[in-house]
Amino acid sequence: MPNQHGNHDKLNSIKSAYIHIPFCRRRCFYCDFPISVVGDKARGEKTSSIQKYVDILCQEIELAGFNSSTSLETVFFGGGTPSLLAVYQVEQILKTLNDCLGIIPKAEISLEIDPGTFSLSQLNGYQKAGVNRVSLGVQAFQDELLKISGRSHTSKDIFTAWDIIQQGGITNHSLDLISGLPHQTLEQWQNSLEIAVSLQPKHISCYDLVVESVTPFGKQYAPGIQPLPTDENTAQMCRIAQQILTASGYHHYEICNYAQPGFACNHNQVYWRNQPYWGFGMGATSYINKQRFARPRTRREYYQWVEKGCLIETENISASEHLLETLMLALRLAEGISLVSLQEKFGEDVLEKILRTVQPYIQQGWVIVTEDKYLKFSDPDGFLFSNTVLSTLFNCFDD
């Protein structure tokens, strides 16, 4: 990996790696991620293009390993649909990571899986390879909403997948849900939450639909206009999630994420704390030595990039950008951000400016300064209006 990654000592501080697996059976109508559609029958053991991708991915990891002697504490396979990989392909990637970067014995190794894409023997194989946490892409429990969203599974597939997870003995598991879908009602959202709670996953992610212009949804729908829920209804969906999940023993530890005690996602907290991490694979982003850089978003360009030695051009993030990123990410967490830490990193003048800027929101009850000197959003209203607060902060420091 090129010298732009920084010096050897700083590479040793990188404890997390994201692995992008781009393959999907089809593209969901809300998705703008860098993916490759392979059809309903393609799988890692059947499709040579998937194996080629895994080989190229491992080449990239090997190049990174020349400059690093770190040991990874978290690994996250995202996508795409990582559960389209054969067991031996997951083994190949994890072996390469361990050989080149090192993986500590008790590392959190997460893998996103979709209903209808994995079997019990496959899940057992993933576990033997080292995977100890899975995230099931449910999105909704209503077949009509799954169809509207372009998902390849049905509600029946969800329950079959959950049974497999239980049989497989994985105890660290998560469900993903999406609110704000076209035609989605408050009753349907509440029903999805209640079903999710009845399954007793250790972790639940509740994402509010973001309509991107390049997606089928973006070309078909305008935010806030039917059949999309109104802004009032989407806010109410967030409140319903907070009420149901916290009452069921889930800690609302991040804007979109809830976990039972001890089961918050360690990997994602690296992002929210603005800590360095590796990103490998098509379209993946790394954040190293206060430099952020992304890989090419198509397979062809990504393969060419790796074959040329992963040459990267980066720009240092300015002090102002680093501050705003730190605020934007850390304030997503329920615990917020330490005022002492902010002062140490950015100075007393910056801290005073932050506190002056958010003072109106403190009076509104959206922002809280705790007794132990943390700045955080209130739950749920502060989280709901977080974009308003952050926009004000960004405008203040941009000026």
Image (cartoon, rainbow, N blue to C red):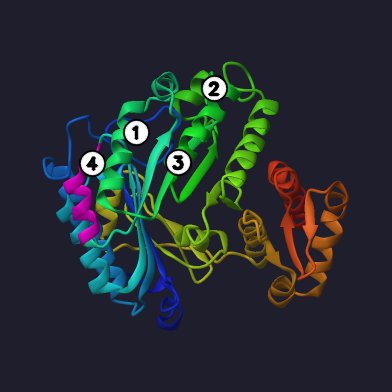
Task: Using the image, determine if residue 106 lies above or below residue 253.
Answer: below
Q: Which residue is mark 2?
A: 184
User: Few, some or many C-alpha atoms within 10 Å of disc 4 (few <14, some 14-19, many ≥20)?
Assistant: some
Q: Which residue is mark 4?
A: 118
Region rendered in magenta: 117-128
Judge depth for marks 1 and 2 and give the one in front: 1
Q: Amino acid at mark 3?
A: Asp
**Residue 176 disc label:** 3
Q: Is residue 131 left or right of residue 177?
A: left
Which of the marked residues, 1 or 2, is nearer the chain's N terminus? 1
SS type, badge 2: loop
Which residue occupies the extreme bottom position in the image?
9
Which of the marked residues, 1 or 4, is nearer the chain's N terminus? 4
Q: Position of residue 66 (x, y in %)?
A: 28, 76
SS type, badge 4: loop
Q: Amino acid at mark 1?
A: Ile
Q: Which residue is mark 1?
A: 158
Task: Using the image, determine if residue 129 lies above or below residue 187.
Answer: below
Task: Using the image, determine if residue 244 lies above or below residue 188.
Answer: below
Q: Is 120 contained in the magenta span? A: yes
Q: Amino acid at mark 4?
A: Phe
